[in-house]
Image: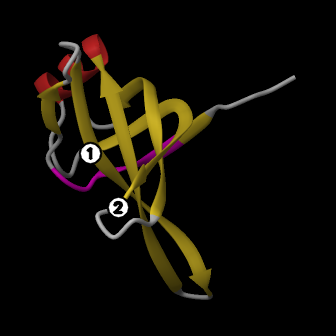
Amino acid sequence: MNLNKVILIGRISQQPTSFQSKSGVNVTRFSLAISRDFQKNSEITDFIPLVAFDNTANFINRFFNKGDLVTVVGSLQSSQYTSKSGDLITSISVLIDQIKSLEP
């Protein structure tokens, strides 16, 4: 049995950006800032890359902005590409299934 489920709570760290894929699908990307304890009285902030498609992408563009506190449910997605220098680069992002505001 396999399970790929991610639940995150954090603040949108950059204004969501949108574009249309070559196949005509709406895509929205942004990062979520999430703080975690590093040492006693010290935090580190992680910036988690997120991506949404179609109706979810449209919903995010309409209702969410930089700084909003949200909860995201989704799954991890990895991709690979070759850099200009020939190195194989692997990136991981969260594919959003659901997003909800935690602010009025």
Query: At x 42% / y 28%, what residue is drawn?
Result: 96
Residue type marked 2: Ser
Whether residue 66 appears in this view of the structure is: yes
* Mark 2 neighbour density, 10 Å: few (under 14) some (14–19) many (20 or more): few
Is 10 inside the magenta-drawn segment? yes
Q: Could you tell whether 13 is left or right of 79 in the image? A: left
Q: Is residue 71 above or below residue 100?
A: below
Q: In this rendering, is residue 86 above or below 37?
A: above
The quadrant in which the C terminus is found is: top left
22 relative to 5 in the view: left or right: left
Q: Quadrant of the N terminus?
A: top right
Residue 68, image x and y in percent?
24, 45
Q: Residue at x 38, y 50 (%)?
A: 49
* Residue 89 or residue 62, whichever sits in front: 89
Q: Earlier in the sequence, mark 1 or mark 2?
A: 1
Check residue 30 in the rendering and tell me which mark sits there, or answer none.
Answer: 1
CA–CA distance between discs 1 and 2? 22 Å
**Magenta stretch?**
8-14
Q: What is the image's colouring?
A: secondary structure
Amino acid residing under circle 1: Phe
In the rendered image, which residue does mark 2 sit on?
A: 83
> Does 1 sit left or right of 32 as displayed?
right
The mark lying in front, picked from 1 and 2, is 2
- The answer to whether any part of residue 104 appears in the image is no
Q: SS for tag 1?
A: strand
Residue 69, image x, y percentages: 31, 45
